[in-house]
Image (cartoon, rainbow, N blue to C red):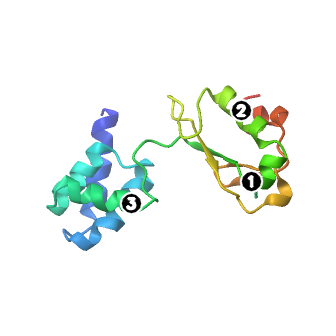
């Protein structure tokens, strides 16, 4: 079975778990994103068809909520804090090193879908500045020298 056929099957399984009611649009969008990590053009189209709505209605709802993503997110989401405390303690060098090692800028995902890089506002752990978060793991007092190890690339 191709990956695409497999993905369509998984999508159909998710949809089958919900009644055909407009009020199910958010739970369906959440379930599809939880399964695939983002909402693809094909997913939006399938959801619209299932709920008998136009694609623009489904897009309209999904773009209203910041939780929904429309591009794939890497297996490891790397978030680098750009808040004041982290900035003062040299986070820009950490971010530069991360970008260099991954070959992507903040807001991008590597072609192999392993890593996504984001810069975020204060993470609320200023005592640990500079802070870098890998999925849910918080790394504090990060130096450019430690980035390679944190990314699992050493
Ligand atoms: S400024 Fe980075 S955690 Fe607060």
Could you say where residue 123 lies in the image, as x and y percent from the top left? 70, 59
Q: Nearer the viewer, residue 148 or 14?
A: 148
Give whichever of discs 2 and 1 has the lower sequence position. Answer: 2
3 or 1: mark nearer the eye: 1
Where ligand 1 lies, by quadrant? bottom right
Question: What is the distance, in whole Å, between disc 2 and disc 3 at their CAs?
Answer: 35 Å
Please give the label number shown on residue 73. none
The residue carrying mark 3 is 31
The residue carrying mark 2 is 96
In the shown orientation, is residue 89 left or right of residue 113? right
In the shown orientation, is residue 34 left or right of residue 134? left
Q: Nearer the viewer, residue 14 or 58?
A: 58
Mark 1 CB near ligand 1 (8 Å cut): no
The residue carrying mark 1 is 138
- Which image quarter: residue 48? bottom left
In the shown orientation, is residue 54 left or right of residue 122? left
Residue shown at the point (41%, 62%) measured from the top left: 65
């Amino acid at each position: 079975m191709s990956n695409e056929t497999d993905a369509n099957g998984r999508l159909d399984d998710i949809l089958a778990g919900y009644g055909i009611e407009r009020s199910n649009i958010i739970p369906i969008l959440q379930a599809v994103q939880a399964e695939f990590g983002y909402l693809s053009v094909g997913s939006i189209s399938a959801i619209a068809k299932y709920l008998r709505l136009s694609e623009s209605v489904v897009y309209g709802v999904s773009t209203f909520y910041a939780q929904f993503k429309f591009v794939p997110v890497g297996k490891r989401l790397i978030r680098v804090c750009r808040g004041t405390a982290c900035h003062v303690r040299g986070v820009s060098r950490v971010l530069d090193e991360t970008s260099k090692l991954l070959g992507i800028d903040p807001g991008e995902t590597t072609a192999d879908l392993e890593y996504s890089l984001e810069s975020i506002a204060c993470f609320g752990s200023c005592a640990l500045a500079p802070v870098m978060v890998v999925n849910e793991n918080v790394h504090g007092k990060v130096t450019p020298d430690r980035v390679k190890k944190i990314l699992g690339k050493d």
